[in-house]
Image (cartoon, helix red, strand yellow):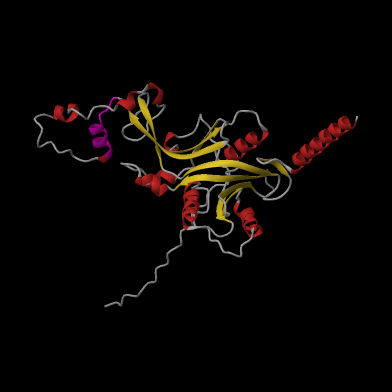
């Protein structure tokens, strides 16, 4: 009888799919980011750093390793070959935490003071039904800016910075299934504070009961043992269409099918659910370069403005002294 030979099997390693550098629809370069700390951070700010990395997915380094001896130049040297276009840097002083958003490699750099912040886990614990599906971070979030149209130069720079930190979309070709998250920045001109919010987007068909929706989505046979007829399952009191879904201001007509429930040419209610993190920011300073260079804007006034104000005050004092001597 012939002896069976032991054949060695060769398994070819599968290459990891590389992310595209250019959007195949818009043709623009896809922005990428590093989120890291400058200096030592307390535990809560470390969690905020991880929340920001998750928010910036999928075009960020979620597991970026940092060391105390790493300088800004070290991150910059790695950023070039990896196509990283923006840095988000968290730091903490004795007075307050700060967030710096910079364009690589030559700036500008925007420095924000963090007045308040809430972590994603805190927001989830405050909700009765927190929602965070697995594919929620598969695509980059949409960006919506409100209150930045006053025409002031520092607000224009802030608008451009945040618009370019996320990939651009073409409203004519974008797939609705890729629009699952939204980042909202609202500027209050009276307090000069920016409300930073992160939401998930969910669509629900208008006029369809919650029971029917769950039945179609979950593919499970409903429990009809205590019902006299199938119609009781559909028309049972307390399970009709939700009142918030009938609000015309929150409904859209879909151009194509989205999932098993939301069909084309039908009305669906747009629901936003906050997933965090949440921050209240104040723009403190804008620098021309990467954490260096001339100061374009300062909440407390630039050095030239202070010198000009001082010279003006000295001139007024001199005129008053001359009048007194006369």
Residue located farthest toward the right when viewing the structure as drawn: 326
Q: Nearer the viewer, residue 25 or 70?
A: 70
Q: Which quadrant holds residue 265?
A: top left
Q: Estimate the x, y position of residue 251 in percent, counting from the top left.
A: 39, 25
Q: Is residue 126 left or right of residue 149?
A: left
- At horizontal 31% and vertical 41% (from top left) the residue drawn is 129
Residue at x 14%, y 28% (from the top left corner)? 232
Nearest the viewer among 208 and 143 is 143
Q: Which residues are magenta?
A: 207-217
**Image coords of residue 100 (percent x, y):** 60, 48
Q: Residue at x 33, y 27 (%)?
A: 244
* Residue 53 lies in the magenta-colored region: no
Magenta part mainly helix, strand or loop? helix
- Left or right: 201 with respect to 84? left
Residue 252 seen from this side: no
Quarter of the image that includes the C terminus: top right
Residue 254 in view in this figure: yes
Q: What residue do we see at 64% from left, 55% from top?
A: 76
Q: Nearer the viewer, residue 276 or 182?
A: 276
Q: Which residue extends farthest front?
A: 325
């Amino acid at each position: 009888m012939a002896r069976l030979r032991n054949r060695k099997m060769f398994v070819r390693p599968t290459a990891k799919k590389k992310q595209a550098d250019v959007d195949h629809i818009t043709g623009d370069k896809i922005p990428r980011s590093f989120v890291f700390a400058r200096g030592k951070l307390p535990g809560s700010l470390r969690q905020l750093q991880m929340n920001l990395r998750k928010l910036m997915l999928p075009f960020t380094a979620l597991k970026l390793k940092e060391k105390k001896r790493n300088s800004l130049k070290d991150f910059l040297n790695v950023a070039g070959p990896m196509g990283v276009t923006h840095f988000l840097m968290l730091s903490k002083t004795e007075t307050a935490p700060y967030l710096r958003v910079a364009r690589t490699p030559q700036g500008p750099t925007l420095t924000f003071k963090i007045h308040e912040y809430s972590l994603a886990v805190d927001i989830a614990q405050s909700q009765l039904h927190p929602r965070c599906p697995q594919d929620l971070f598969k695509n980059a979030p949409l960006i919506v800016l409100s209150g930045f149209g006053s025409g002031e130069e520092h607000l224009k720079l802030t608008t451009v910075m945040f618009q370019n930190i996320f990939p651009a979309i073409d409203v004519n070709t974008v797939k609705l299934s890729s629009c699952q998250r939204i980042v909202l920045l609202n500027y209050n001109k009276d307090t000069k504070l920016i409300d930073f919010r992160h939401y998930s987007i969910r669509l629900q068909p208008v006029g369809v009961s919650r029971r029917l929706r769950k039945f179609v989505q979950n593919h499970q046979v409903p429990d009809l043992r205590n019902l006299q007829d199938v119609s009781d399952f559909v028309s049972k009191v307390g399970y009709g269409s939700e009142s918030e879904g009938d609000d015309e201001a929150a409904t859209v007509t879909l151009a194509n099918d989205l999932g098993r429930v939301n069909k084309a040419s039908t009305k669906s209610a747009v629901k936003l659910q906050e997933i965090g993190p949440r921050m209240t920011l104040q723009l403190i300073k804008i620098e021309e370069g990467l954490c260096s260079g001339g100061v374009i804007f300062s909440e407390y006034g630039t050095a030239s403005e202070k010198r000009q104000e001082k010279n003006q005050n000295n001139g007024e004092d001199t005129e008053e002294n001359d009048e007194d001597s006369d």
